[in-house]
Image (cartoon, rainbow, N blue to C red):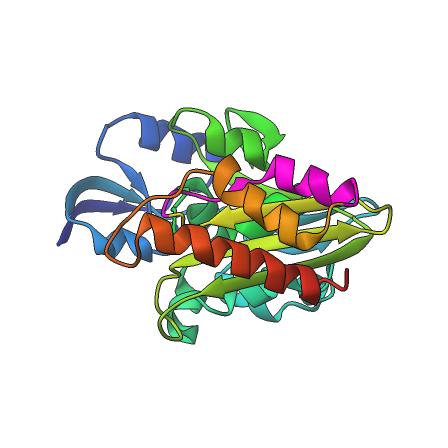
Amino acid sequence: MITIKEYVAPVSLEEAYKILMSGKTNLILGGFGFIKMGSRAVNKAIDLCNLSLDYITETTDEILIGAETSLRTLEINEIIRNYCGGAISEGVSNIVGVQFRNMAKVGASVFSRYGFSDLLPSLLVLDAKVRLYKGGIMDLEEFLEKDFERDILVEVILPKKKGMAVYDCIRKSTGDFPIINGAIFRGEDGQYKIAIGSRPQRAKLAVKAAKALEDGENIETVVDIIPEELHFGTNVRGSKEYREDMSKALVSRMYCKVGA
């Protein structure tokens, strides 16, 4: 059960950050989605609703997604649906149900770095960056690997890319957490990016496997690299061995879908 002592809605990022750092149990709500899975006492629950961070805007070189943008907006927004084949929209469309996706926010989904995230694999293969209030701009890959530091995620930055991306997953039923998921990107210049998530650890790029594809290795050889390069584990949804086998099937399936 979650207990909240005080709800606050600051009117500036500076105010929000000061409140966040003023107590160890202060928390950014981020739509109050997956937070409810745990049990904790929150001193101050910080809602970023007054900071105008609900946006998806397109510039010449980038697409900017505000932290307060809902997962449902990612699913239906035309800019995101038309971006590199719509992999991001496809990924979030599998998350629980529409009501939940209307509530859960992009910033919280990314900053929390959940292992089961359906959003992170697609963002990784598309070279996304994050803008943090104190930490500044950094590659999403770097952010996921660095030690946790308290901060506020302001926006996700997507570079304009020429190519096709595909998201796919294996789950027991629609709306359930994925047993394993992933994404693949194929650029017009022959570049490949592969990310596998829900291992059950958070999503990670399979750099060696992607390089093998670029070097012309056949997909049967490439998929054998995945369990050698990435670590897989066991939880209630699946065993280490099952995930290793399914990662091969998943990458093969995505490779076919990406039009290789």
Q: Residue at x 40, y 30 (%)?
A: 17
Residues in magenta, as a range: 200-216
Asked whether 173 or 135 is in front, the reply is: 173
Asked whether 27 or 118 is in front, the reply is: 118
Determine whether 171 is above or below 142 in the image: below
On screen, residue 184 versus residue 54, left or right, reads: right
Determine whether 116 is above or below 140 in the image: below
The number of callouts visible is 0
On screen, residue 22 versus residue 160, left or right, reads: left
Q: Residue at x 46, y 58 (%)?
A: 246
Asked whether 144 or 256 is in front, the reply is: 256
Q: Quadrant of the C terminus?
A: bottom right
Q: Residue lying farthest right?
A: 189
Q: Is residue 202 magenta?
A: yes
On screen, residue 55 versus residue 113, left or right, reads: right
Determine whether 241 is above or below 17 in the image: below
Q: Is residue 168 visible?
A: yes
Residue 128 placement (x, y as % from top left): 64, 42
Asked whether 59 or 10 is in front, the reply is: 59
Q: Residue at x 26, y 51 (%)?
A: 235
Q: Is residue 67 visible?
A: no
Residue 129 placement (x, y as % from top left): 62, 37
Residue 209 placement (x, y as % from top left): 63, 41
Q: Quadrant of the N terminus?
A: bottom left
Q: Is residue 244 magenta?
A: no
Residue 122 placement (x, y as % from top left): 59, 52
Q: Residue at x 38, y 59 (%)?
A: 179
